[in-house]
Amino acid sequence: MTEQQLVQAAVAAMQRAYAPYSGFFVGAALLAADGRVFTGCNIENASFTPTVCAERTAVFKAVSEGVRDFKMLAIAGGKSGKLTGVCPPCGVCRQVLSEFCPPDFPVLLAETPDRFRRVTLGELLPYSFSLENTP
């Protein structure tokens, strides 16, 4: 799968978001090492705390299917289901990704359906929390 195809999968996943409170739709597409793609969308809740982000939805779907080896992640987001610029993952999602992915893990941030920025997880979360780093 190409980077562009992964971004397009994230854009498609964005359309399935349930975001009646914020109106901000996010889609994610996570490419596993075995070639499978796990998509996710944000799912909001009236009490906000149970809300889950697209990135964590994709990771949790993959892990629940026994997959823990990933190659790349694409993220697309914007108001009312339209891309409105890059949508980097929140801090919680960055930490979840760091549980399964190395610092050089590529993250594609969609600007439009045809253009994206490529960053690494280490750039997004330079000092992740891990049990290796605790006394």
Image (tube, rainbow, N blue to C red):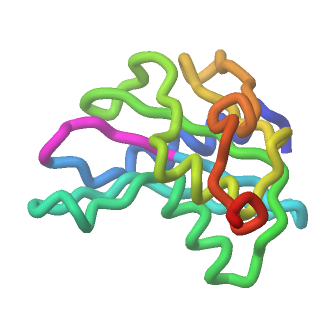
Residue ID at (74%, 24%):
118
List x then y, in percent, for residue 33.
88, 61
Q: Is residue 25 magenta?
A: yes
- For the residue pair 51 and 41, the one nearer the viewer reads as 51
Viewport quadrant of the C terminus: bottom right
Measured along the vertical axis of the image, is residue 25 above or below residue 19?
above
* Horizontal relation, residue 120 to residue 51: left or right: right
List x then y, in percent, for residue 1.
85, 45
Magenta-drawn segment: 21-27
- For the residue pair 89 and 80, the one nearer the viewer reads as 89
List x then y, in percent, for residue 55.
53, 52
Residue ID at (84%, 66%):
69
Measured along the vertical axis of the image, is residue 27 above or below residue 70?
above
- For the residue pair 17 and 92, the one nearer the viewer reads as 92
Measured along the vertical axis of the image, is residue 94 above or below residue 84?
below
Residue 113, quarter of the rendered image? top right
* Horizontal relation, residue 19 to residue 33: left or right: left
List x then y, in percent, for residue 26.
41, 41
Q: Residue furthest front?
A: 135
